[in-house]
Image (cartoon, rainbow, N blue to C red):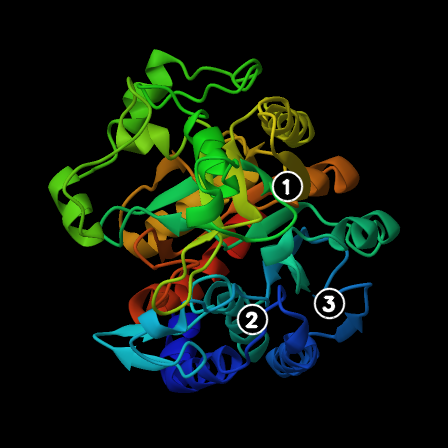
């Protein structure tokens, strides 16, 4: 296996330059003006997969953004690993908070600063370079398939149809995803699950036009005030979510599971200092790690209305809007929770305003078994390159397509992420450490090796 390390060391500078080129493409799936950028990015991914040694690479158009599929089949008797990732990225807003251009990657203090560096271009590209390592050293122990989509950041609306219509094409023995993080490079970990997601938008409308706040203030309901009160009613004094039925299906973690979670190192002082806050906030009775892993949440992702420009304008607005998301834990249904959210906001609307609530997208929570061959292969691979056995942890984020993969393809998923929680995912100044990028390329081949051996 030394040949892998030697090859990777010899070509590491080129690996990095290729990633930087990928990061320069503003592949923002949420913005229609980036449609051409999305198509260009898919083409670049195709070229890189072919250069890495894939036998075939196909770009499949969808009603939205294209899907890139590739495969390297060496021996049908060998196990097949399906690698999933996404080339689309979050919008870069607010641009003014970036220290450098979001699509002009900068390397500073050993970190790549650019939108998509950790989520997910930097992480899925590790698998592309792992494939190249195998093909150039003639040492591929498995068959590999790639499914790289362009709509993960908007809920993968067209991937479900593609998966249902291409079950034979996607046939494999396991799905491998690098779109998660680990505790630290000193304390490696593997996510054993991700939370589900329910995402809605609520619009409150009052008068039929914006009004003078002096003439009408005090006589007409202000949509911003009403929306603020509605949102505030979603949590009680213990930061417990008050929406009826929200917790009905939550499976409470056992004392044993909570005790294992407590073994993960956590420095509260350092955590607060990194975020520039004086105190933590969350549901009473749970630790910070529990709140971000085993507990569901409800958060406001954006709120607007009235006049927000420079200077002042004393206006009573006609409408106010908020984007709201809930992160869900095992046994909660995204469909059921979405309906509860929509119904709640409509039911508490006072007279004098109307409420329009609609769903954006969602996804089910997912857990992976730690007694599976695939998880054991991943844990052994991490232990091989890090020198430490990884800690199994619950991830706080969401990958909406996971439950559909298992339902339609009958496959379990293993998360093998190399990012960090501090990588500013979805925020200004997103970054990915160079050491993490290279460590991922080093570790992934061992997963394939051990998975093949354990399935022999």
- Image location of residue 131, percent across then percent down: 57, 70
Assess disc 1: are there few (<14), some (14-19) or many (≥20) residues with their C-alpha within 10 Å of its C-alpha: many
Closer to the observer: label 2 or label 3? Answer: 3
Local secondary structure at mark 1: strand
Closer to the chain start, of discs 2 and 1, is: 2
Nearest the camera: 178 or 339? 339
Q: Is residue 83 above or below residue 362?
A: below
| Of the image marks 3 and 1, the number of the one nearer the N terminus | 3
Q: Secondary structure at mark 3?
A: loop
Q: Classify residue 356 by image quadrant.
A: top right
Q: Secondary structure at mark 2?
A: helix
Residue at the spot 34% in from the left edge and 28% down from the top edge: 290
Left/right placement of residue 271 relative to residue 312 reads left
* Mark linked to residue 128: 2
Please state the horizontal and vertical placement of residue 10, each as a whole percent of the image.
38, 84
**Which label is found at residue 65?**
3
Quadrant assignment for the N terminus:
bottom left
Between the residue at mark 2 and the residue at mark 1, the CA separation in whole angstroms equals 28 Å
In the image, farthest residue toward the left: 269
Which quadrant is the C terminus positioned in? top right
Residue 85 badge: none
Which residue carries the number 1 mark?
362
Q: Are marks 2 and 1 in contact (CB under 8 Å)?
A: no
Note whether residue 83 is visible: no
Left or right of residue 315, residue 140 in this image: right
Task: Say which of 356 and 278 sits in front.
Answer: 356
Residue 431 horizontal/vertical position (percent): 35, 67
Out of 213 and 163, give the one closest to the viewer.
213
Question: Can residue 86 be spotted in the picture?
Answer: yes
Who comes first in sequence, dot 2 or dot 3? 3
- In space, the residues marked 2 and 3 are separated at their CA atoms by 21 Å
Q: Position of residue 204 (x, y in %)?
A: 59, 40
């Amino acid at each position: 296996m030394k040949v892998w390390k030697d090859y990777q060391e010899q070509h590491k500078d080129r690996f990095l330059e290729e990633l930087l080129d990928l990061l320069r493409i503003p592949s923002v799936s949420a913005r229609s003006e980036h449609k051409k950028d999305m198509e260009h990015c898919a083409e670049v991914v195709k070229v890189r997969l072919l250069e890495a040694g894939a036998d075939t690479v196909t770009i499949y158009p969808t009603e939205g953004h294209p899907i890139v599929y590739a495969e390297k089949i060496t021996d049908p008797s060998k196990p097949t690993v399906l690698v999933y990732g996404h080339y689309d990225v979050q919008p870069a807003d607010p641009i003014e908070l970036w220290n450098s251009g979001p699509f002009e990657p900068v390397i500073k203090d050993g970190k790549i600063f650019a939108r998509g560096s950790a989520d997910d271009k930097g992480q899925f590209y590790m698998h592309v370079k792992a494939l190249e390592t195998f093909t150039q050293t003639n040492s591929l122990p498995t068959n590999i398939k790639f499914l790289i989509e362009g709509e993960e950041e908007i809920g993968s609306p067209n991937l479900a149809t593609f998966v249902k219509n291409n079950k034979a094409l996607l046939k494999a023995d396991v799905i491998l995803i690098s779109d998660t993080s680990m505790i630290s490079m000193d304390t490696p970990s593997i996510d054993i699950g991700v939370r589900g997601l329910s995402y809605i938008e609520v619009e409150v409308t009052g008068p039929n036009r914006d009004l003078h706040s002096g003439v009408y203030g005090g006589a007409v309901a202000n949509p911003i005030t009403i929306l603020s009160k509605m949102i505030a009613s979603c949590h009680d004094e213990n930061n417990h979510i008050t929406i009826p039925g929200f917790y009905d299906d939550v499976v409470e973690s056992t004392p044993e599971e909570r005790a294992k979670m407590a073994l993960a190192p956590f420095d509260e002082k350092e955590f607060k200092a990194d975020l520039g806050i004086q105190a933590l906030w969350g549901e009473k009775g749970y630790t910070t790690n529990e709140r971000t892993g085993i507990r569901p949440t409800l958060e406001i992702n954006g709120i607007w209305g009235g006049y927000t420009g420079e200077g002042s304008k004393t206006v009573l607005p006609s409408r106010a809007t908020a984007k709201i998301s809930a992160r869900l834990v095992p046994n909660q249904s995204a469909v059921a929770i979405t309906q509860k959210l929509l119904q709640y906001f409509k039911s508490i609307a006072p007279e004098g305003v109307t409420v329009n609530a609609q769903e954006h997208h969602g996804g089910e929570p997912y857990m992976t078994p730690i007694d599976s061959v695939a998880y054991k292969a991943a844990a052994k691979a991490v232990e091989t390159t890090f020198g430490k056995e990884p800690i199994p942890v619950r991830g706080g984020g969401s990958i909406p397509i996971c439950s559909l993969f298992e339902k339609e393809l009958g496959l379990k998923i293993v998360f093998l992420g190399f990012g960090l929680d501090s990588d500013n995912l979805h925020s200004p100044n997103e970054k990915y450490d160079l050491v993490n990028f290279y460590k991922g390329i080093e570790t992934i081949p061992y997963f394939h090796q051990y998975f093949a051996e354990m399935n022999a």
